[in-house]
Image (cartoon, rainbow, N blue to C red):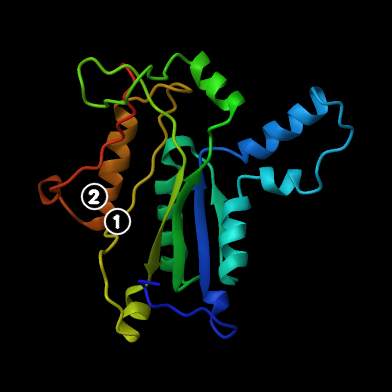
């Protein structure tokens, strides 16, 4: 609504969505397993498979808004939302879309997921204090957030109020450990982003930290 965009039959193919999720539809999967293994149900509900797919969120967004351009899900743990935004930027840069809705959503508060994180010994017993010396872990939550990304040409042509500009993107892989990050991986991503944006480190005045609250 704030973007003032209108998606219709004429331009729907130029509108897309990229949604990052930490995992599949945990609630749907857990409910199905419980009904079969504990309640003796012999058949799963008809939409169990599609609702459990990581691409389901992006698909629902496209159905609700009538988006017929590039629509896909991105699953890369804590980086999924950022990766979705980066992938959406690529779609616009490549000329595949004029407008992309990009962001993330997650709903991990199920019994099985909580017990899984508990097994990793990273759940905080009380509050999450990412930058405290006595931090004790992460607190899982649920939510969703989306940003409207638009090519400059398309936004300028309709007189849109531009709130921010994506100057550059950068991605990397640690190739280090399944749960522990390395120092080199994030550094490579930031250097790649700066190079893409044609900026220097001194040009950056704000960093959004990945503060999980886990003990190093």
Seen at 47% across and 64% down, the residue is 91
**Which of 110 and 149 lies nearest the eye of the viewer?**
110
Q: Quadrant of the C terminus?
A: top left
Q: Can residue 45 be seen in this view?
A: yes
Q: Quadrant of the N terminus?
A: bottom left
Examine the rendered structure and indicate whether residue 170 appears above or below residue 148: above
Residue at the left extreme, as displayed:
202
**Which of 94 and 150 lies nearest the eye of the viewer?**
150
Seen at 63% across and 51% down, the residue is 56
* Mark-to-mark CA distance, 2 and 1: 7 Å
- The answer to the question of whether label 2 and label 1 lie on touching residues, with beta carbons closer than 8 A, is yes
The disc placed on residue 194 is 2
Q: Which residue is denoted by mark 1 in the rendering?
A: 168
Question: For the residue labelled by badge 2, is the local secondary structure a helix, a strand or a loop?
Answer: helix
Seen at 56% across and 77% down, the residue is 12
Q: Where is residue 30 in the image (x, y as percent from the top left)?
A: 68, 31
Examine the rendered structure and indicate whether residue 62 appears above or below residue 21: below
Classify residue 94 as left or right of residue 52.
left
**Which of 75 and 63 lies nearest the eye of the viewer?**
63
Crowd around label 2: few <14 · some 14–19 · many ≥20 (10 Å)? some
Question: For the residue labelled by badge 1, is the local secondary structure a helix, a strand or a loop?
Answer: loop
Seen at 31% across and 35% down, the residue is 210
Q: Where is residue 183 in the image (x, y as percent from the top left)?
A: 29, 26
Question: Total marks drawn?
Answer: 2
Classify residue 47 as left or right of residue 74.
right
Crowd around label 1: few <14 · some 14–19 · many ≥20 (10 Å)? some
Q: Position of residue 78 (x, y in %)?
A: 43, 36
**Which of 137 and 150 lies nearest the eye of the viewer?**
137
Q: Position of residue 103 (x, y in %)?
A: 43, 53
Could you tell which of marks 2 and 1 lies nearer the N-terminus?
1
Q: Is residue 94 visible?
A: no
């Amino acid at each position: 609504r704030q973007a003032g965009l209108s998606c219709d039959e004429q331009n729907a193919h130029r509108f897309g969505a990229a949604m990052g999720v930490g995992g599949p539809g945990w609630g749907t999967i857990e409910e199905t397993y419980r009904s079969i293994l504990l309640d003796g149900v012999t058949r799963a509900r008809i939409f169990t498979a599609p609702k459990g797919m990581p691409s389901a969120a992006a698909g629902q967004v496209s159905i609700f808004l009538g988006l017929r351009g590039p629509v896909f899900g991105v699953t890369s743990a804590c980086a999924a939302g950022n990766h979705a935004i980066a992938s959406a930027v690529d779609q616009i840069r490549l000329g595949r879309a004029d407008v992309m809705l990009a962001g993330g959503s997650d709903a991990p508060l199920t019994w099985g997921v909580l017990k899984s994180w508990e097994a990793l010994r990273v759940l905080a017993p009380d509050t999450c204090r990412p930058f405290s010396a006595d931090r004790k872990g992460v607190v899982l939550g649920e939510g969703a957030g989306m940003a409207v990304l638009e090519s400059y040409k398309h936004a300028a042509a309709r007189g849109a109020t531009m709130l921010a500009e994506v100057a550059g993107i950068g991605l990397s892989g640690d190739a280090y450990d399944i749960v522990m990050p390395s120092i080199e991986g994030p550094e490579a991503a930031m250097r790649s982003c700066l190079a893409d944006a044609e900026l220097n480190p001194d040009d950056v005045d704000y960093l959004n930290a990945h503060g999980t609250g886990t003990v190093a």
